[in-house]
Image: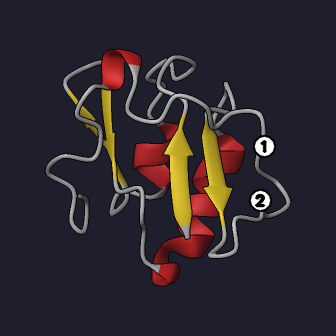
Amino acid sequence: MRLVVDLNRCQGYAQCAFLAPDVFAMHGEEALLYNPHADETQRRAVLRAATACPVQAILVEDDFGDTPAGTDPGAGSGEGAGAGEGAGEGMPGAR
């Protein structure tokens, strides 16, 4: 499973961090850290987090590049860009 968060769209509501804390975390009040290659055991929590995102900034792809139902395929541009520079640092399994 591959995650992409549009960090230009993300507003820091942190719903993802509440629903999938092993994958998403807030660093300070605005910077989101996340593991772009979350473990399959986290799939259910990640899909819930993507669905709950108020601005639909989370894109979830399966191993074949397909977007599962319930996620916004237009939300995924800009991985690692903008205010979230360094996204994923400090998260287990992050690059």
From the top left corner, tell me how far across and down residue 66 is, in percent. Answer: 77, 65
Instruction: Name the kind of residue labelled 2 in the image.
Output: Thr
Residues marked 1 and 2 touching at CB (< 8 Å): yes
* 1 or 2: tag closer to the N-terminus: 2
In the foreground, 14 or 37: 37
From the top left corner, tell me how far across and down residue 90 is, in percent. Answer: 14, 51
In the foreground, 31 or 64: 64
From the top left corner, tell me how far across and down residue 64 is, in percent. Answer: 70, 74
Disc sitting over residue 82 in the figure: none
User: Would residue 12 be found to the left or right of residue 88 on screen?
Assistant: right
User: Would residue 79 be found to the left or right of residue 33 on screen?
Assistant: right
Q: Residue at x 38, y 16 (%)?
A: 82
| Outermost residue to the right | 69
User: Would residue 50 be found to the left or right of residue 29 on screen?
Assistant: right
Above or below, 70 relative to 62:
above
| Outermost residue to the bottom | 41
Write down the residue under mark 1: 73
Above or below, 34 relative to 37:
above
Write down the residue under mark 2: 67
Q: Secondary structure at mark 1?
A: loop
From the top left corner, tell me how far across and down residue 25 is, in percent. Answer: 30, 44
Above or below, 55 relative to 34:
above
Quadrant the C terminus occupies: bottom left
**For residue 68, what is the image quadrant?**
bottom right
> Crowding at label 2, few (<14), some or many (≥20) Cα neighbours within 10 Å?
some
Question: CA gap, disc 1 to disc 2?
Answer: 7 Å
Instruction: Name the kind of residue labelled 1 in the image.
Output: Pro
Q: Residue at x 66, y 61 (%)?
A: 61
Q: Residue at x 76, y 49 (%)?
A: 71
